[in-house]
Amino acid sequence: MMKKISLPKMLMKYFWDCDFENLDMSQYSFFISERILNYGDIPSVQWLFTQIDKVFLAEIVDKSRNLNKKTRNYWNLVLHG
């Protein structure tokens, strides 16, 4: 069983529709990463990059059905150069 990794309070605004206290990276890493990639500000994205492997982020960008087209293109450029 993975250790629960709680989210910092600065991310609460992106998860207004969720039970924020019960979100943790070990269980919902795809969903959390997807939401931050789509809507996050610079500090939020910086936090995400300290938590998630770049290869996994690239996989999210490739597989996500929730990233809008411009966001997907941006993250493809950032992650793949």
Image (cartoon, helix red, strand yellow):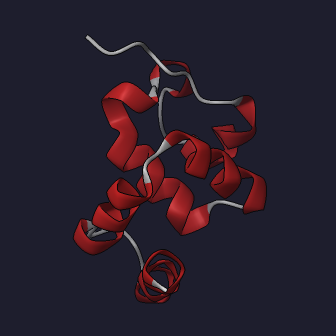
Residue 34 in the image: state x and y as whole percent: 42, 57
Q: Along the line of sight, which residue is nearer the eye, 58 or 73? A: 58
Against 58, residue 27 (above or below) is: above
Q: Along the line of sight, which residue is nearer the eye, 3 or 53? A: 53
What's the residue at 53%, 40% (across, down)? 51
Against 67, residue 69 (above or below) is: below
Against 61, residue 46 (above or below) is: above
What's the residue at 60%, 44% (across, down)? 50
Q: Give the quadrant of the N terminus.
A: top left
Say whether residue 23 is left or right of residue 60.
right
Residue 37 in the image: state x and y as whole percent: 52, 63
Tally of numbered discs: 0
Residue 26 in the image: state x and y as whole percent: 37, 27
What's the residue at 59%, 64% (across, down)? 39
Q: In which quarter of the image is residue 12?
A: top right
Residue 81 in the image: state x and y as whole percent: 49, 86
Say whether residue 26 is left or right of residue 15.
left
Say whether residue 65 is left or right of residue 55.
left
